Amino acid sequence: MSGQFVKAVLAIITHICIIYLALRSATIMITRTSCGILVKKILHNDQALDYQRDGYVFPIKALAIDEAHGYRCRLEAAEDALGRKLQHMELHKSYLFFTFLDELVRHECILDAVEDLIGPDILTFSSSLFIKEPGDKRFIAWHQDSTYWRFEPTDILTAWVALTPCHRGNGCLQLATGSHRWGQVEHRETLDERNMLSRDQQIDNEVIERATNQDVVLQPGEISFHHMFTAHASGPNSSPDRRIGFAIRYMATSTRQTGGPKLTAMLVRGTDTHGYYEPEQSPQRDFDPDGMAFHRQTVERHRATKYSTM
């Protein structure tokens, strides 16, 4: 075997290894199914396993930094148009009347990652803008989203999208590793006005101390995913800038609501052959009158639960 041939073979092997490592570390992978079809994936297999093991996975790069900044600018332009900050229920299910948030709940890269976790037929039924102003002393106490919703099966996930840098100094999300395996945990009522939860509830610290708590440090455009049983919290913002996150709740179309005020939902990918939920429509423009009217109607259903079941 000639030296030139060996060098050529080694060069080819090296090139293949470089390509493999590049794909292995890339945000988006191309995977071949058993049918020979190429499918775009966001999550590596080990990241999907991390989600199953820990109840969360992060950071996942979904948006470019400039793209995330653009969404922040559009949000703040909407606030300027209102002449005030968004308030109370305007922060929830806002994709019903803001086109840019409708775009975000349908963002291809976010949905690609969601599909990796719960399958191709996807509904969104809830969202929340979590905005902490500079020096904001408010916090979100340890809790589980499952406290507020009743579903079967329970494979509901939250995609938490960072529109600004998120770190411990400005009140980033915190997650309790493995807490999704605890099932539903008892929450107790508190009277702390700084607690941003609508029902002012929290899990006792003795329970949270069972797990290792993880700070979810994210750059703009990065997202984290957590299961509805995963205990989570966030602290105050002691930084000089706003901390903005957009939490989107997704479920498979086969998921049934088993309790609470009747939910509406929007099909964002695939098909819905079940029809369990009253369908939502995308807004035609920001502050869409039809979207705002539907939003008010939907919100009213949750008044009795202090809107915690939104």
Image (cartoon, helix red, strand yellow):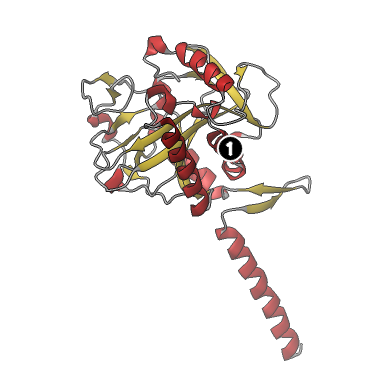
Who's the residue at 68% across and 24% down the image?
A: 272
Side (left or right) of 35 relative to 213: right
Instruction: Farthest residue to the bottom: give it.
Output: 3
Question: Quadrant location of the N terminus?
Answer: bottom right
The front one of 190 and 46 is 190
Task: Name the foreground residue: 145 vs 281.
Answer: 281
Locate residue 132, reporting x and y percent.
32, 38
* Residue that lies at the very extreme toward the top in this rendered image: 304
Picture mark count: 1
Q: Residues within 10 Å of mark 1 (few under 14, many from 20)?
A: some
From the viewer's perspective, is 112 left or right of 179?
right
Q: Residue at x 33, y 48 (%)?
A: 167
In the rendered image, which quarter is residue 13 located in? bottom right
Q: Residue at 62% of width from left, 16% of height from top?
A: 276
Looking at the rendered image, the quarter that the C terminus falls into is top left
Name above or below for residue 144 compared with residue 176.
above
- Where does the image place residue 153, in percent across and percent down from the top left? 54, 22
Question: Dot 1 corresponds to which residue?
Answer: 103
Residue type of the residue flagged with mark 1: Glu
Q: Secondary structure at mark 1?
A: helix
Where does residue 133 sit, x and y in percent of width and height? 30, 39
Taking the image as shown, residue 287 lies to the left or right of residue 235, namely right
